Amino acid sequence: MTVTRGFTGRSRAEDRDPRLPPGQYDAGDSWPVLSAEVTPHLTPADWTFRIDGLVAEGCTWSWDEAHALPPSAYEGDIHCVTSWSKFGVRFGGVSLDTFLDLARPHPSATHAVAYAHTGYTTNLPLSDLTGGRAWIAWEFDGKPLAPEHGGPARLLVPHLYFWKSAKWIAGLRILDQDEPGFWEQNGYHARGNPWNEERYAGD
């Protein structure tokens, strides 16, 4: 697969909103829909979320069980590797810390592979998923998350490029090493920090 750099050029520094990472533009009220896969027909009744691998206890939550956990929200900005950023968004769900506290990763655990109900995968350091930095989200602006944006529930890791926020999240596999996911195997950066422009391998 050929990776193309489809993002826009940089504008003059004095014209840029300080909330914009390098190479990004403000998407305003729009929210572009970009997916590696066809949007699945997945209902809340079909949805589950599991954490396994290097954990003290593998855990699986149904829709109702996940909703019974303490709620948490994210308010802030999101950034896509294709160059758009969206300011002042609000997602509702449950902090990933809550799920991980129940599964209890082993001391040797360093990374996770997030996987979707479609089979999509992406890799993340555990340090990017803990400390109030990640969520399982099922609401956007107070409404159920739309299927094309990952509903009924998606992973939300807003401080990284949005391909790391896996749509239609099904689980996390906890590891003691890094293991590239779908886009990472096809030329994208292992971590994806927008402020460092970590778009592609070698950036």
Image: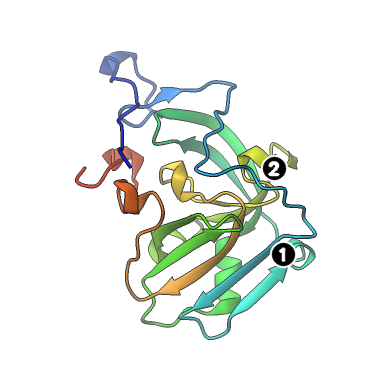
Residue 64 in sight: yes
**Residue tagged by mark 1?**
66
Relative horizontal placement of residue 151, taking residue 169 as reference (left or right): right
Image quarter where the N terminus lies is top left
Q: Residues within 10 Å of mark 1 (few under 14, many from 20)?
A: some
Relative horizontal placement of residue 42, taking residue 129 as reference (left or right): right
Q: Secondary structure at mark 2?
A: loop
Mark 2 is on which residue type? Leu
**Residue tagged by mark 2?**
145
Q: Are marks 1 and 2 in contact (CB under 8 Å)?
A: no
Residue 3 in the image, given as x and y percentages of width and height: 31, 37
Q: Is residue 181 above or below residue 30?
A: below
Residue 130 in sight: no
Q: Is residue 97 above or below residue 106?
A: above
Mark 1 is on which residue type? Ala
- Disc tally is 2
Relative horizontal placement of residue 55, taking residue 186 as reference (left or right): right
Q: Secondary structure at mark 1?
A: helix
Q: Earlier in the sequence, mark 1 or mark 2?
A: 1
Q: Residue at x 35, y 60 (%)?
A: 180
Image quarter where the C terminus lies is top left
Q: CA distance from mark 1 to mark 2?
A: 15 Å
Q: Residue at x 62, y 40 (%)?
A: 149
